[in-house]
Image (cartoon, rainbow, N blue to C red):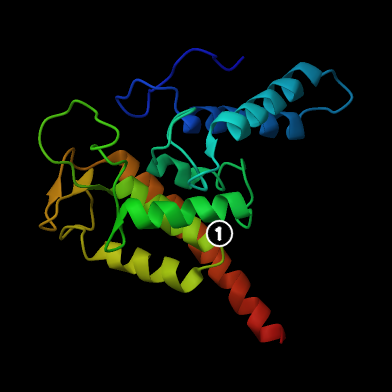
C-alpha cells in the first residue's frame, strides 16, 4: 500500500512531494488494468482514486494555475514533467498545460531545465546547482506528448551538443556549458533513451498522418 508518511526520496527535501503521490498512483492503475478483472481489486482501485483525489485537492495550486512540488505549497518542481508519462494526467489536460507553461517560465533556461528553484525550495546543499539533464529529457518528452513536436525535437537535438566526445552525460550542466556532478549518470541516459523512443514514435505517427491527407 502506498505510504502516507512524508516522502522526499527523489530529492533531499522535507515536504510531502506531489510527484511522490502521482508516481504511486501509476503502478496501482497499471496493475488493475492487467489483472483479472473478475478478482477482487476494489481495495487497490480505491487506493488509486484516493491518491488521485488527494493530489488534485492539495497538489494543484489554483491561484498560480499549476501543480506544485509539495502539498499545500506553491513551489514548482521539474519532476512534475513526468505526470503525463506515468498516466496521472493526459497531455492535453488544461491543468497540465498550465503547469507546463509555469515550468517553462520559472525552471527552463535556454531549453535546459532546473530541478527546482533553490531560492524558494532550499535544499541545504552547498554551491550552485546546474540544470539537471534528466529533467531536460523529461521536458522534451512532455513537449512531445503535448503536441509540440517541433519544440521537442529542437530541444532534444540541442541536448546532443552538451554531451562529451563519447556521447555521454553527467548529472548536470553548469551555466558555462560544462558537465558537472556524477559522471556518467545512469538517470541521464535512461531518460534520454525513454525520451528518444517516445519522440520517435510520435514523429512517426505525425508523419503517417500527413501521408494520409
Residue 45: x and y, percent?
75, 25
Q: In which image quadrant can residue 13 be found?
A: top left
- In the displayed structure, 107 sits above or below 79; it is below
Horizontal arrangement in the rendering, residue 208 relative to residue 7 (left or right): right
Q: In which image quadrant can residue 21 be found?
A: top right
Residue at the extreme right of the image, as rendered: 38
Residue at horizontal 65 percent and vertical 31 percent from the top:
52
- In the displayed structure, 11 sits above or below 44; it is below
Residue with the mark numbered 1: 145
From where the camera sits, is residue 197 visible?
no
- In the displayed structure, 41 sits above or below 186; it is above
| Quadrant for the N terminus in the image | top right
Residue at horizontal 23 percent and vertical 38 percent from the top:
119
From where the camera sits, is residue 87 visible?
yes
Nearer to the camera, 203 or 70: 70
| Quadrant for the C terminus in the image | bottom right
Residue 161: x and y, percent?
22, 66
Residue at the extreme front of the image, as rendered: 63
Residue 125: x and y, percent?
16, 28
Nearer to the camera, 154 or 166: 154
Horizontal arrangement in the rendering, residue 9 relative to residue 112 (left or right): right
Residue 178: x and y, percent?
11, 54
Residue at horizontal 16 percent and vertical 58 percent from the top:
164
Crowding at mark 1 (Cα within 10 Å: few <14, some 14-19, many 20+)? some
SS class, disc 1: helix
Amino acid at each position: 500500500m502506498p505510504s502516507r508518511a512524508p516522502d522526499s526520496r527523489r530529492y533531499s527535501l522535507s515536504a510531502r512531494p506531489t510527484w511522490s503521490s502521482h508516481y504511486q498512483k501509476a503502478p496501482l492503475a497499471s496493475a488493475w488494468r492487467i489483472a483479472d478483472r473478475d478478482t477482487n481489486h476494489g481495495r487497490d482501485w480505491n487506493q488509486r482514486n484516493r491518491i488521485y483525489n488527494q493530489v488534485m485537492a492539495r497538489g494543484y495550486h489554483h491561484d498560480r494555475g499549476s501543480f506544485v512540488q509539495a502539498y499545500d505549497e506553491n513551489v514548482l518542481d521539474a519532476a512534475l514533467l513526468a505526470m503525463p508519462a506515468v498516466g496521472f494526467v493526459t497531455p492535453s489536460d488544461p491543468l497540465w498545460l498550465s503547469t507546463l507553461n509555469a515550468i517553462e517560465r520559472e525552471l527552463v533556461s535556454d531549453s535546459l531545465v532546473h530541478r527546482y528553484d533553490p531560492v524558494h525550495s532550499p535544499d541545504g546543499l552547498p554551491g550552485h546547482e546546474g540544470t539537471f539533464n534528466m529533467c531536460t529529457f523529461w521536458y522534451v518528452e512532455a513537449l512531445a506528448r503535448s503536441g509540440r513536436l517541433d519544440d521537442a525535437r529542437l530541444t532534444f537535438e540541442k541536448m546532443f551538443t552538451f554531451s562529451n566526445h563519447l556521447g555521454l552525460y553527467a548529472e548536470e550542466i553548469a551555466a558555462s556549458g560544462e558537465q558537472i556532478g556524477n559522471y556518467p549518470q545512469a538517470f541521464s541516459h535512461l531518460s534520454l533513451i525513454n525520451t528518444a523512443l517516445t519522440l520517435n514514435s510520435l514523429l512517426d505517427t505525425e508523419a503517417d498522418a500527413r501521408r494520409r491527407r
